[in-house]
Image (cartoon, coloured by chain):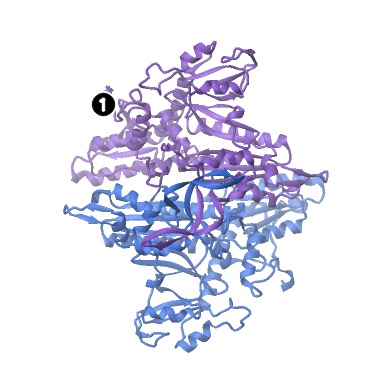
Chain colours: A purple, B blue
Amino acid sequence: MSKEKTAISPTRADDYPEWYQQVIKAADLAENSPARGCMVIKPWGWGIWEKMQKDLDGRIKATGHENAYFPLFIPLSFLEKEAAHVEGFAKECAVVTHHRLEERDGKLIPTGELEEPLIVRPTSETIIGDAYSKWVQSYRDLPILINQWANVVRWEMRPRLFLRTAEFLWQEGHTVHASETEALEEVFTALEMYRSFSEEVLAIPVITGEKTPGERFPGADNTYCIEAMMQDKKALQAGTSHYLGQNFAKSSGIRFLDRDSELKYAFTTSWGVSTRLIGALIMTHSDDNGLRLPPRVAPKQVIILPVVPDATREAEIFAYAEEIAANLRQVTFFGSNLDVHIDKRDIRGGEKNWQWIKKGAPVRIEVGPRDLEKRAAVLYRRDQEPKEKHFLSFADITTRVPEILAEMQNGYLNAARVFRDENIRTDIKDFDEFRAFFTPKDMNKPEIHGGFVLAHWCEDDAVEATLAELKVTIRCIPLEQDGSTGRCVITGRPATKKAIFAKAY
Amino acid sequence: MSKEKTAISPTRADDYPEWYQQVIKAADLAENSPARGCMVIKPWGWGIWEKMQKDLDGRIKATGHENAYFPLFIPLSFLEKEAAHVEGFAKECAVVTHHRLEERDGKLIPTGELEEPLIVRPTSETIIGDAYSKWVQSYRDLPILINQWANVVRWEMRPRLFLRTAEFLWQEGHTVHASETEALEEVFTALEMYRSFSEEVLAIPVITGEKTPGERFPGADNTYCIEAMMQDKKALQAGTSHYLGQNFAKSSGIRFLDRDSELKYAFTTSWGVSTRLIGALIMTHSDDNGLRLPPRVAPKQVIILPVVPDATREAEIFAYAEEIAANLRQVTFFGSNLDVHIDKRDIRGGEKNWQWIKKGAPVRIEVGPRDLEKRAAVLYRRDQEPKEKHFLSFADITTRVPEILAEMQNGYLNAARVFRDENIRTDIKDFDEFRAFFTPKDMNKPEIHGGFVLAHWCEDDAVEATLAELKVTIRCIPLEQDGSTGRCVITGRPATKKAIFAKAY
């Protein structure tokens, strides 16, 4: 397809950040709201989030967790209890100071000042910790394995749809354990859950690893993450799992009487993924014609497009479309029935087709008068553009569609894995090469840069400051290590671990 | 069961409001939070809400609506646009005025004052209306049929778990139409959805009706509701559906170019139910032994209780319990597989049993050594206390359990309907009788009063003020009317409509 004919302008190559915004607009996923930094998630975008939630919620429950719900507001004094925590979040807090509005001189002003301001939760460790401190008395009350689906607010100066918004939606798991060993096990259970979800459902390959001290969650002893590569070769942190040690147990007073009759502080963890994953999904799979959705998170996997040449034939063609849809809706795909939509709108066929291409619907099935006569249909796959026609008999539709969807699901994951692996450099020798790799070739397109570097690192935190000028960060120390020793790519000092270096969202 | 042996103290007859709090505590549904007026919904309470959400969400989608998500914050100026609306909510708004915290003299204080304060949404007509005003250009863009599941905040001076909390969870439907007729049809579609959901799923019989002008949603042309009767004979408004006319279309600028090429204001509706329904559920079905849950909203419908006399037999008894559970988990009940839990905790059998009675689990199945030998089990139903034993063979369990659950579901609805109908007085002739009916016989128990009165009403709003001294309100003018004319029960004036009068939550 020639460049002039792409549905999205600019293309990825021309202007990646603007392409991202245009894909969201063309797929009608979300828009900015007049409530500063907040977004409106539109039905197609919300449909993706619903699919994500349903699958991940199943994984959360299958690993022994229950859902619950904790308050939106956190008393200021609670946030203050953990010093590192409050320092990490103080600069981005929405603060509720009044509880009513009154008219004065024809203007509404806030009145009813609160004795203690309330913070709109940026994360819930402190308010949940307070509840847990009352629930936990004895080792018999442990472990507590709870998750919540909630909205959180972190004030953003430069919001960007899905990637950085003042309000975002997420799940946050908060668990309490009697021992460090058990708490660490939980941290890795959650991390593995995120890895498998990301790869199997979102078709996003990820690297699991440990964060450096400078990148830890405020108040955590250790933070683990999954890191993905976007198509501009930048990294995106797609989920985190925190080992909180006894820090929050101490600040919230979560203590238990152990088997040995001693009163001990518990060990806690927390872990979360958010609507940011929708941003990751867009930037991993989409092309210059718009969104491409892995079938497992597509709000509708199949769009049926009736082609009606004249009104006299409409009824029979619609009836045929309904027949196909009814059959497909009986087909299960990864445990759920297929979601099928018939687009009966009276608009031009070409326009209709392009709308669904831009929305990333995995499969489109066209049925016109000739298909009806032959009891057949024409199928188009979103992963094959310019569009390749697949002629299917009526009987084959229900067997071929789930096969094609499974092929696409795997295909998207494999393509993303190949792209990522091709763009991880493992042969960078020293800081000169490193600097050259991360310096944009074209200063007009600072977003185009090298990719990931996997190289030895001396584990000296001071190194991270050196990287700031290149806008590079250590994304993680991968859990999987080859065990080799070598020289730190930044300092040349001896090193036993390799790290992933990259620019990041 | 003698009074002394009830699990909940006080009983309903002794102190109904306190009984309500104790049922919540005994079932471990929720608790008050230090964030003033907010509640923590604990796993068993959240499980009920999840069941409600899943069913209602299916009904919302089956009637043609899509889900989306709009911001938590509303700019103050948006709220002001509709005069009646802002007046209705100004006194209970949580106001965000600052966006960061800074340390001054060792104290954290709010800084970064916002140019325009943000209101934490008490309801979303104004912020959603703003989005709709951009989405709607032509009659082709209509109708818009969108719902969101969200948290909302209305400052409460006297919070009460589930019934009145500062933060609560709900769904709010917001639709836009080209004509009044279509908008009114939508209002009744939503109302009927709430009626059927309430009766079929929650087993709560409701009266559908129209609110009087004084009880309308702020900014609505008309409000319709479903009203239920609690066991203390007070009314609880369980859901509302509002016809907003062109009020919000005008304040938000939702206009469309009609087929006749004229630019017209659209007609909007909104409708919602909330976590308040959990309060209604508790007060409709529970008894002096705690919660009783209609099986369709029970987080677990079946609890299996292994009885292990000595440790040597544990493995085989647990295995038998697992076998029963695995079979039951294959059984579908109203479209979903049964939720079954095996309680393997090593605590006294009697205590375990009482915990599940208090939690309202519909069915308990005990399996001990003798049951194992006979390949049988003993089943207890929560609707039959003092407990009646049902002896079932292994083969019968999977057929009898869903039958028993269906019987319980119907039984709860029928019992609630009989109770309500017995307590609707239709023979009150004049205001003297009316006053006597609503005056507590025992001033130490002001919550014990007459019930509902269905009587003629002259439709003069001034009447409602007269009722205030009795703490009675007009709950609704039922949609179902017998067409008779008569004398207003308050004023004696001629009247053509009957209304429901009651004290209410």
Q: In which image quadrant can residue A187 be found? A: top right
Image coords of residue B336 (percent x, y): 52, 50
Residue at the extreme front of the image, as rendered: B105
Judging from the image, what secondary structure is the residue with disc 1 in?
Answer: helix
Examine the rendered structure and indicate whether residue B317 appears above or below residue A395.
below
Lateral position of residue A41 relative to residue B442, left or right:
left
Identify the residue shown where x is 47% and y is 86%: B428
Image coords of residue B335 (percent x, y): 50, 51
Given residues B48 and A33, the one toward you in this image is A33
Lateral position of residue B71 relative to residue B106, left or right:
left
Q: Can residue A142 be seen in this view?
A: yes
Image coords of residue B245 (percent x, y): 30, 62
Q: What residue type is labelled 1?
A: Lys
Examine the rendered structure and indicate whether residue A219 appears above or below residue B284.
above
Given residues B165 and A190, the one toward you in this image is B165
Q: What is the total number of numbered labels drawn onto the structure image? A: 1
Give the quarter of the figure containing the N terminus of chain B: bottom right
Lateral position of residue A198 relative to residue B341, left or right:
left
Q: Which chain carries label 1?
A: A
Instruction: Give neighbour class at mark 1: few <14, some 14-19, many 20+ (Cα, 10 Å).
Output: few
User: What residue is shown with label 1?
Assistant: A5
Q: Can residue A375 be seen in this view?
A: no
Image coords of residue B147 (percent x, y): 40, 52
